[in-house]
Amino acid sequence: MTDLFDVTGRTVVVTGGTRGIGAMVAEGLLDAGARVLVTSRKADACRAAGERLGCPAVPADVSTPEGIAAVRDGVDTEFGGSLDVLVNNAGVTWGAPLDTFPRKGWDRVLSTNVVGLFELTTALLPALRRAASAEHPARVVNIGSVDGLRVPMFENYSYSASKAAVHMMTRHLAAVLAPDRVLVNAVAPGAFPSDMTAAALASDSGRALLEKAVPLRRLGTADDIVGAIRYLASPAGSYVTGVVLPVDGGIAGCSA
């Protein structure tokens, strides 16, 4: 049973791994014995995270060809071009009233959350295929959102649409890559402490509103998200692909 969830020595890339859910995942997998490389758009944040976690850190905007190339080069340098697990966590959001929601709120969100995720995954396919075998499939874990499963509380139209697209892309990639022994799944987090929820959590009333929307009446913790990712990245998840797993305290599953 101990070996079932073992990720010791697995090579892992976590995009957006310097804060929020990405930082939780990176730290949790490092603690479990994985070899982790984190990325971030901001060079200073990337450097600080690398020093704090004691792992390689690559400044990269995965919505750009240059950023994708930087991550691919990092995998070549740090892991010899072989990648066991890709966690596509990098993402942005945009909120604005319906009548004034701007075009740039679509362009920025979709280019990062959907196009960037797709292009990074395809760029790293040679490394994932190199690591994959029937006994030990490679993994792609996409971070979606409960906002891609149900109508959100907030007016974040491009964000919720992008996460629904991530969920569908997960299924599509899983079907295509199954013969290559590359498993593709998604996790759909609910309310977790992060930059995206910082404004709502800045006040007691905002926190209470978020917690009230969760059937379990609490926010997610690092253990909640790390446990789900570790399951999908370990031998325990070797027969699971094309799944969108809500980690949301019951928001998606318990709604009417």
Image (tube, rainbow, N blue to C red):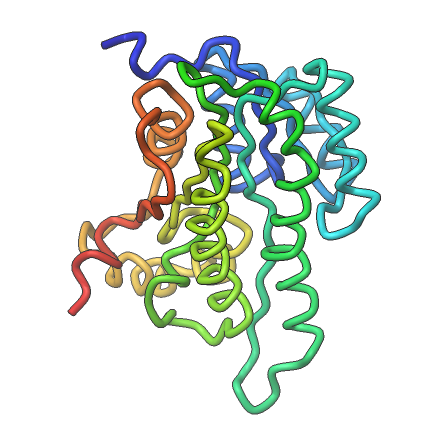
How many numbered callouts? 0
- Residue furthest to the right: 66
Residue 226 sits in which quadrant? top left
Residue occupying the point 28% across, 57% down: 211
Residue 234 coordinates in the image, percent (x, y) = 38, 20
Residue 232: name its quadrant: top left
Picture quarter with the N terminus: top left
> Residue at point 36% right, 57% down?
146
Vertical order, 189 against 71 (above or below): below
On screen, 85 above or below 147? above
Which quadrant is home to the C terminus? bottom left
Displayed quadrant of residue 112? bottom right
The percent coordinates of residue 148 (x first, y second) are 41, 62
Is 235 or 62 nearer to us in this picture?
A: 235
Residue at 47% from the left image edge and 66% from the top image edge: 160
Q: Which of 86 and 196 is in front in this view?
A: 86
Q: Position of residue 223 (x, y in %)?
A: 35, 30
**Residue plotted at (49% across, 54% down):** 169
Left-right relation of 239 to 142: left
In this rendering, is residue 19 above or below 9? Answer: below
Q: In this view, does 62 lie to the left or right of 34?
A: right
- Quick one: which residue is furthest to the bottom in this view? 99
Percent from the top left, x then y, of residue 7?
Answer: 43, 15
Look at the picture and state if 3 lies above or below 180: above
